[in-house]
Amino acid sequence: MKKVLITENLRIDLDSEQWECRACGAELIGARENYKRGLLVYDRDPREIHKPLLDPDHYEFTYAPNPQWCRILEYYCPRCGSMIETEYLPPGHPPIHDIELDIEALKRQWKDRPEVQEAAVGQEYPRPVAHGGPRAARLYTGEGA
Amino acid sequence: MNDNNITPDQQAMLDRFVRQNKLFYAPDPAIMENHRIDPRSEIEQRLLSGEVDPHKINEVRGLIISALDESNTMIEQMGAAPGAKWGDMTTGIFTAAGDLSMIAPHGVGGFAAAVFYPIKFINKYWTDEPTVGVREGDGFIHNDARYGGIHNTDQSMMMPVFWDGQLVCWVSATIHEGENGATEPGGMPAAAESKFDEGLKMSPFKVVENFELKRDLVTFLQNSVRDPKLQLEDMKVRLHSCLRLRERVVKLLEEHGAEALIMTLRKHIEDVVDEVRRRILELPDGTMRTVSFADSTLRESALLKLNMAITVKGDKLTVDMRGSSPELVNRSINTCQASFKTMLYSGWMQNVWPDLPFTMAVFTPFDFVFDEKSIVNGSFDTPQAMSLIPLFKTMTIASIPMAKFNYSLPNRYTAMVAPQYDQPATLIYGGITQHNEFTGNFCADINGMGQGGRSHRDGEHSVSPPFAAHCDLGEIELMEEDLPLVRLGAFTLTKDRAGFGKQRSGLGYEQIHTFRGSALWGYMTGCTGSLFPSAQPLFGGYASPAYPLCKIKGINVFDELQKNPERVPFDIVRLMNERAIEGATYSTHPSAMTFELAQPGEVYMLCQGAGGGYGDVLQRDPALVMKDLEEQLISDDTARDIFKVAYDSASRLVDEQGTRALREQERRARIARGKPFDEFVKTWSTPEPPAHLPYMGCWGADVNTVYGIMMGERVKMSATALQSQFMLNPKDVRIAQLEAEVAALKRAG
């Protein structure tokens, strides 16, 4: 049985052709479907997350998004409640079908690839130190921290 | 006489006539819409068909890169523009045909990646033009993005290099110059309503002969801008940087011969094309989609969509921007497709494949699809002076779909990262300095965006602009020597204004500006994201917050600092909430402001922004939340409400069991309040944008219908027949509102 990691929170089981939650392993929906159809959605007022820092009694703009312009769609795993995805959209804008994979091609691609259970981190390239000096470079790389 | 059949001789004569009597050498779509490298020239074909010595190529490449590094450092050391001081420049080398081969290691790649367009224009039109020509010792200048470039503040010098009478390569030097004589100072006029308000609009022309600047043309350019000293100085800097680069290339030619140079420049880009095809092939086949919104035209609030779908099939990758906002014929935030591709490429090289050599050849295997007359494929007549609005979003937008393509790969070319902050949050200034000089430019804060959260660690604070990893913020003290600006708060990180997530974004910082010692001084800002957050999150994180422009007017803060210094904390939130300065007017605004004059001691404040958060906030390590508290990056409120950590406020010791319980409780609450997707969309999705929203772009998945705003009214258009949108003058709109109020009051009274 081979599973392919698709995002931080989702994987596809190539044998069962199911989207799965990576936090709890729940089967969400068929891999050929929009994975969002296997999740719960909540329409969040953005002011609950990005709270007004300036007094709303005095100011129209407060560092909080305007709820008439912007909503946050939060997508949850129906079994464990992990937040699988978020989407910032104007009110009423249909959710984006953000991931649409060719499952047959995916199966062919992974036929001879060994399964990856923990995602690789990938290299971070050191930045030039011309302006910040070696101390800034150490802060960036974490070296000596 | 009605017979239209003409002989081949007649056709040839007609073609010659048309060629010799061209009315206007406008940007050539055959050049501007072609981002791919040219086919091999005859000599490249001959050289690369034979044996290629990789060691020789590597040796020559090393010599070129070292020469590029030196010439770029020359600009950094000598350049007068603020941009040049903090890294906003580059030098580059191109094949004889004009394809970008290499840039300086610390250069801004987008500059060189845009300069291949004007070089191809020069090759095509000026080489055989008897009144121009391309000869040894010539140099060409250019700034109009319609002929290639990012925006018209950037000026380039392009110089052909000949060997044995043959053109063997081109070299270039580019600086973000700033001031260019536009309708507002600083070169990025939000108020431009037509391209004729944009200031200098240099199509590529010859400004250097026999290796010397033509002083008559330099004078014309100086006479066209607010800062003639800057114009002259940096033209000299670009010329001498190119001359030094040319000198090093000539030495290389003497030592290794022209064939080695030609082979190296071409092989370098062909190898990149091969590698990119291999990388596309290893991605999963499919389509990834994302959207990004700008909430202002810089003159009025409006929600403008950038709509992106990236499709991979085998070794083909297609970037589809259909459904994006239509172009605005009297607003400056349009961009042409060449600039769009260049900046998409710049962001790609920062976030997706930063290990590849910096050459536009990376995009040779890519296909692009645009609607005609969209905001990212603007037509020739649209103003594009503030193209940075869509272009900054362009630089980060691909981070989301490409993260979804790349996540599964067994081998990653760099760390997974959420989008960086994507708006030019900096003050643009203009006026007379304390040295009695007229100037206009921008602050280097444009280089201080917070990074998005990464898969394995938080994003960095105020790290760089999204177009170049190495650019720096500038030294405030140095700026204050030249300008009347005084920074009361410079680099205080913006507490609680982050993209929250499992890995939070890097934060931006506060900028608290005032000035003294000038009788004529003012500001503009060209930034969106005060209503709708700019930097989007990745994999279940939260976005950056929204950022307003804040002002304290009607007082002189220097007087207050003498009398009551305790009433002027160097902290935007405290300043604005405590409202302690007597007689002051405190106000907040969208972060887009056309140029306005200020009085000495008045205060203008904005924030550099945060990137997007990465992953679920409930998965954040509680110890990292405590570290954020300790570093004053977040408040107790955020630690408890957003991250759901239980801890002792005094000692900041985490109650692990309590935290587990809080988080479990929140997960259960999510399940309780969430609705199944199909049920949710039935009540959520609307067939059209809400009536209250000034919306531009497609709505939902249907890219065939695009909404716009024409003369204040919503219009619905076929994507294949977009119309340029004409916006009402905001002052006329305001006058109409006030007249209506007066009329209503009269009726009531």
Image (cartoon, coloured by chain):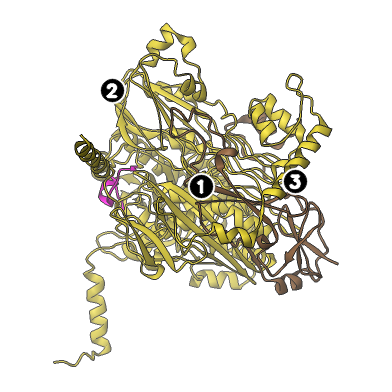
Chain colours: A brown, B yellow
- Say which amino acid is labelled 3: Arg
In this rendering, the label closer to the viewer, 3 or 2: 3
Name the residue tied to disc 2.
Answer: B436
Q: How many marks?
A: 3
Residue at x 57% of width, y 57% of height: B256
Q: Is residue B521 above or below residue B391?
A: above
Is there a contact, CB below 8 Å, between mark 3 and mark 2? Answer: no
**Lateral position of residue B416 relative to residue B267, left or right:** right
Measured Cα–Cα span from mark 3 to mark 2: 66 Å
Q: Is residue B293 magenta?
A: no
Measured Cα–Cα span from mark 2 to mark 1: 46 Å
Name the residue tied to disc 3.
Answer: B668
* Residue A96 at least partly seen: no
Label at residue A70: 1
Is there a contact, CB below 8 Å, between mark 3 and mark 1? Answer: no
| Disc 2 packing (10 Å; few <14; some 14–19; many ≥20) | few
In this rendering, the label closer to the viewer, 2 or 1: 1
The residue nearer to you, when weighing B741 against B394, is: B741
In this rendering, the label closer to the viewer, 3 or 1: 3
Q: Is residue B293 above or below residue B318?
A: above
Q: Position of residue B293 (x, y in %)?
A: 48, 51
- If the image is split into quadrants, where does the C terminus of chain B sit? top left
The residue nearer to you, when weighing B20 against B417, is: B417
Q: Are marks 2 and 1 on the same chain?
A: no
Q: Position of residue B490 (x, y in %)?
A: 50, 25
Residue at x 75% of width, y 73% of height: A108
Q: Main secondary structure of the magenta part?
A: loop
Specify the segment rendered in magenta: B189-203
Chain of the residue under the numbered disc 1 shown in the image: A
Residue at x 47% of width, y 64% of height: B322
Q: Position of residue A75 (x, y in %)?
A: 66, 53
